[in-house]
Amino acid sequence: MSVTEQKELLTKNKQTLENSSRRNFLKNLGIVGGGLVVGIPLTGCASVQLPNTMDSDLQPNALLQITANNDIYFYLPRSEMGQGVYTGLTTVLAEELDVHPGKIKVKNVGAHDEYANPEYGLQLTGGSNSIRTHFIPLRQMAANVRMVIRQAAAQELQLPLDQIQTDDGMIVANGKKWPYGAFSEVAAHLSLPEETPIKKKSDFKYIGKHSKRLDSVAKSTGSAEFGLDVEFAGLHRAALKRCPVLGGTVKSFDDSKAKSMPGVKAVVSIFNGVAVVADHYYQAKAALPVLDVQWELPETLSDFSSDSTEAGNGKQLFKDALDSDEADNAYQEGNGREALTTSDTVVSAEYWAPYLAHATMEPMNCTAKFTGDQLEIWTGCQNPGVAAKLAAFYGDVAKEDVTVHSTFLGGGFGRRIANDYVAEAVSIAKASGLAVQLIWSREDDTKHDYYRPATMAEFQIGLDKNGNIDSWNVKRSGPNILPYTMDEVADAMMPGFLPDGMVDWISKAGFSLFDGWTVDPTSVEGLFEDYDANHKSADHVTVDPGLPVGFWRSVGHSFSGFFKESMMDEVAILQQQDPVAYRLKHLKHNPRLANTLKLAAEKAGWGKPLPKGHYHGVAVHSSFLSYVTEIAEVSVNNGQINVHKVTCVVDCGLAVNPEIVIQQMESGILFGLTAALYGEITVKDGAVVQSNFHDYPMLRMHESPDIEVVIVESDEAPTGVGEPGLPPIAGAVGNAIFAATGRRLRSLPLKLS
Amino acid sequence: MISFKLNGQTVNVDAPGDTPLLWVVREHLTLKGTKFGCGMGLCGACSMLIDGVSSRTCIMPVQAVANRNITTIEGIGNPQMMSTLQNAWVETDVPQCGYCQSGQIISATALLSQNNNPSDNDIDIAMSGNLCRCGTYPNVKKAIKRAAADLRKGKGRLQVVQVFDPTANASPETQGVQS
C-alpha cells in the first residue's frame, strides 16, 4: 500500500471514528483482541545497530555494550525529562553488573521496538512506571551479563567459576584483577545465561544508597543537549502560524510580504498552518505577523468560551451534563448510589478544575532533515517510537527510512507524549525541501497544548447514624484524553496495527475499557478508590468543547486528588471530627496510605500550636501505586494565600535513589502548587486566552514553601514517584485555607477574592 | 558589524542591531548553553552576565551590548573545570530536566559576586527572575549557600577562565576573533 493510499485509508478510518463507536474503530485498526505482550527482549540478540560496534564488544542486547577497552555503555530505553531515569535505571543496571553507576556511559537512544516500555509495548515514558517496570528485567539482564563475563574469565583463566568474582567492573581471581573488557570478546561468543539469581536487598551496594545524579555535570555546565540545541551545517529555522482556534486549517494565505522579509527562504502551507523558513529563528518569527492567513475554523470549539454564562456554553456545559440523568458507570461496589436512600445524612458538593497547559521550560521543537528518501529527526520526546512513525507518515517515507536522534527533554510532564511538533517539522522540511528546526514560541506553547481536561464533579456521601461513611458516590463531567491520543497514534500507526501493549497502556487502570468501552479510566481515576465505604459508585458523562486534551502530570489524579480530599475534609468537619482521625477511620483497607498519614501528622506536629495565623491542612492520595500524605502550613493575609511549609510522607516501596525520590516529591508539590494557586487556561470563541508567563504564571522561588519529605522504609517493589507527589497538594492547601478562614474553596485555582 | 566581548574574547557579529543577544549567541556564535524559554524576559532561561549583571538576553538587542562584557554559562566553567557554584550544583543534585539551570547558575553567580553570605531573602530576591518548572528551588537555595560557604573559606572561584574559540564550531557568517 502506498503512503497516499494509507492516508486515504486513514481519513476513512477517522470518519469511522466519528461515525461509529470507538470500539469498532479500534477493531478496524486491529488493536482489539489478542493477548497482552509484556516484556522487552532483554535477553535476546540485539537487532539494533549500536554505534562503533566491534567484534570484540559484548553486546548482549540493544541496551548494553561492553567494549574491549572496558567502556560500558547503557542505551537508556526511557526518556530523561528531569524525573531521574538517567540515574535510576543506570543504578539498577549497575547493581547487578557490579560496576559503580558513575562508570557507566549513558546514551540517549533513538527509536526501536527493543526499547519498548515493558508495560505498554511502546517506547513510551510516562505513567511513573520506569523504575517499577524495569526493576526486575534490567537487573536480570545485568546479572546474566555479569555471569557470562565470569564464565568467559573462567574459561580464559582456566579456573573454576566459583573462583571468579567481580568488583566494580573488574574480574577478581587469584588475587589479581582484570577489567570486564578483557573478556568481552570471549563472552560475546558464549550463550547468555537466562536465569542467573539476582541479589537480595541486603546485598545491594548502589540501590537505595545515596548516589549523585549522573546528568548533573552536563546540566550544570550548559553542555547537556536538548532538542533546541541541535545544530549542523545547512540547518534552517522555522516558525509556524497556526489557527488561533485549535483544529483549524488554512483556507487561503498571502505570503507576498513575508517572502520578502530578511533571511526568509521559504513559506509553506502544511496541515495545520503556514510556516516561514529562514536562516535564523528571529527572522522566521519576525515574518509571521506579515503573513496573512484565512482560516477554516472548527465548528464546535469556535463556539466555546469558558467564561460564558450562556446555556450550553462555558461551565454551564459541564454543569448541565452533570445534572442530566445521562451517565456511564465506571465503578460500582455494594449497592452503589442506591444506598443513599438508607443513609442517615447525605453530604453533597460540587467541584471544578480548569484546563491547564504544561508549560515545559523548553518550548516544543523538532529538527527534520531529508537526504533523498532518508529522513532524520532530532527531538526530545516521551514517545520516540510513535514520533518515528508519525514522521514517516507526514514525510511520505517508509518507516524503516526514518532515524530518530533523541536528546534530553527540557521538561515533559506528559506534554511530550504527543508528537504534534514532529508532524509539523517533518511537513515543513518536506514542503520546503530544506533541513529545518521548528521552534515554538512560548505563545505557541501556551496556546497549542494538549491541555489537562477541565473537569466538574459532584460527590454525594452517605453517612450512617454514627457519622461514618456508608456510601461514596461521585459523578464526573468533562472531556476524555483517549480520543485525542488515539487520533495521533492512528496517524502514526496506519495502516498496520497497534502493538498489543497499547491496549494495556490505554486501559492501564484495569477497567473494562475494551469490553464495555465506556469510560476512559483517566477521567475518573482517584475520585473513589482510597477510602472505605460499604457502597461506592463512580459515574461519568462526557462533555467536550473540543479543546484538545492530554496527559498532564498525574493525569486524572491532578484534579481528583483535590476534589476527593476537599470533600473528605468537608465531611469530617461537618461531623465535628478531626480531619486526620476521621481519615484514619476510613483507611482500614488502605494501610500503606494510613501509615503515611500517621507519620506525616507526627512529623508536622498536627494538632500542636503553630505560629500565630498559621493553619494546617491535610490531604492523602494514592496514585501510580504509591501512597502520599501532605500537610500544608498556610496563612491568609488580606486574601493573600501564603504556603509556608509542606510536610510530605511517601511510600513508594523501595527507594532506588532516595535523593531523587525527595526531589520528585518536591517537584510534584511545586508543580501542583502552581496549579493550585495560579493555573487556569481560559478559552474565548475557541481560542486560548493566555499566552506567556505574565498571564499564565508559574510559582517562583520566593513563593516556594519549605518542604520536608520523609520516605517510608519499605521492602516492597519500587513504585512511581514522578507524579504521586502532585495530587494531594491542592487539597492540603485548600483545607488549610478552610481552617484559616472558614471558607471552602471548591474551584481551582484557589482564590479568596 | 557589532563587536562585544564574549567569555573574554572579542567577537564581531554581522546581525541586525535589534536582533536579541540570545539568538546571536545561540545561532550566529553557536554557543547553546543559554536557553530560550519565553522571549519576553519573564523566565530567565536566557540569562547571561552583561558586565557582571544577570540579564535577560531574549529581549536585549545586540546593539545594546556593543563593546560590553558578556559571560554565558560556557564562560563560567566546563565539565572538566567547574566553578564553585557548578560544583555545588552537582554536589547538591540540583538539576532535574536541567533546561533552566544555565540561567539559574548565571543569576546565582551574579548574586555571589556581590554577596558571599546571602540570606534566604537575598537569595529569593536574586533568583526570583529565574523560573524552574521542575521545582528545583529548594536545592538551588541549598547549593547557593553551599557555594557561598566554600567561597568564604577561599575555596574555588565563581568563574573559571575560559578560552572561547569561535572558529572551532562557528557558523559561516561569524567573523574572526580579535584578541
Image (cartoon, helix red, strand yellow):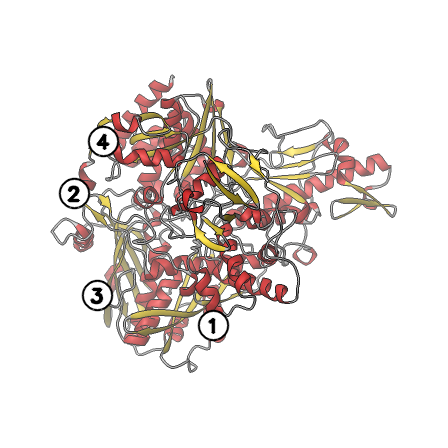
- Mark 3 or mark 4, which is nearer the start of the sequence? 4
Pinpoint the chain carrying mark 2.
A
Residue behind mark 1: A598
- Mark 3 or mark 2, which is nearer the start of the sequence? 2
Residue at 72% of width from left, 42% of height from top? A146
Q: Are the residues at dot 4 and dot 3 in contact (C-beta closer than 8 Å)?
A: no
Mark closer to the observer (4, 3): 4
**Quadrant into which the C terminus of chain A falls:** bottom left
Q: Dot 4, crowdedness within 10 Å: few (<14), some or many (≥20)? A: many
Residue behind mark 3: A341
Distance between mark 4 and mark 2 Cα atoms: 20 Å
Amino acid carrying label 1: it is Lys
Amino acid carrying label 2: it is Asp
Residue at 11% of width from left, 52% of height from top? A310
Distance between mark 2 and mark 1 Cα atoms: 49 Å
Q: Which mark is residue A293?
A: 4
Q: Dot 1, crowdedness within 10 Å: few (<14), some or many (≥20)? A: some
